[in-house]
């Protein structure tokens, strides 16, 4: 089965940014996990997960983000989520547990 998700890890100012594009589902979840592991290995102060180019956001995406924020991240984590991702997060109450930011500049400047 073909994975329809791309993941890139880059640095921006005082942050490591994981940028995702495509469909985040059970098949593509390992790609997200690998990118998060790479980002967490970087000593930057802030982890930003950019979901603005995600076209499908399955429940596994919520689970991985929650795991990263609460169990694995030794630093602030900010999530960039467009409405198509923000709505599912809000529907299950994760918007109260995750720090959602409107854009990259805000995500970096409001951290820590």
Image (cartoon, rainbow, N blue to C red):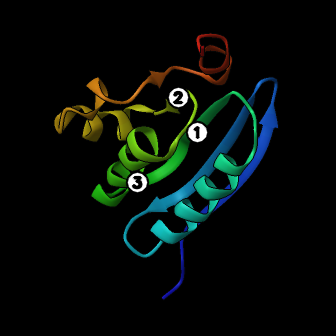
Calculate the distance from the C-alpha at mark 3 to the C-alpha at mark 1: 14 Å
Distance from Cα at disc 2 to Cα at disc 1: 8 Å
- For marks 3 and 2, the one nearer the N-term is 3
- Give how far across and how far down residue 96 sits, in percent: 27, 24
Q: Quadrant of residue 75?
A: top right
Q: Residue at x 53, y 31 (%)?
A: 77
Neighbour tally class for label 1: few under 14, some 14-19, many 20 plus, Cα within 10 Å: many
Secondary structure state at the residue bearing disc 1? strand
Residue 78 coordinates in the image, percent (x, y): 53, 28
Q: Which residue is mark 1?
A: 50
Camera-nearest residue between 27 and 109: 109
Residue at the location (82% across, 24% down)?
A: 13
- Front of the two marks 2 and 1: 2
Instruction: Work out how far the residue at label 3 is from the one at label 2, CA to CA, in angstroms.
Output: 14 Å
Give coordinates of residue 73: x percent, y percent. 53, 40
Q: Quadrant of the C terminus?
A: top right
Out of 91 and 108, give the one closest to the viewer: 108
Density class for disc 2 (Cα within 10 Å; few <14, some 14-19, many ≥20) is many
Residue at the spot of label 3: 64
- Which numbered marker is on residue 78? 2
């Amino acid at each position: 089965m073909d994975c329809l998700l791309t993941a890139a890890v880059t640095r921006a100012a005082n942050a490591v940014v994981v940028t995702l594009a495509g469909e985040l589902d059970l098949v593509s979840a390992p790609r997200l996990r690998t990118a998060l592991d790479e980002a967490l290995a970087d000593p930057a102060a802030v982890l930003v997960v950019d979901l603005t180019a995600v076209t499908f956001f399955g429940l596994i995406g919520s689970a991985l983000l929650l795991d990263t924020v609460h169990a694995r991240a030794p630093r602030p984590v900010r999530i960039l989520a467009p409405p198509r991702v923000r709505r599912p997060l809000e529907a299950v109450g994760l918007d109260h547990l995750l720090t959602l930011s409107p854009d990259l500049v805000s995500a970096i400047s409001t951290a820590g």
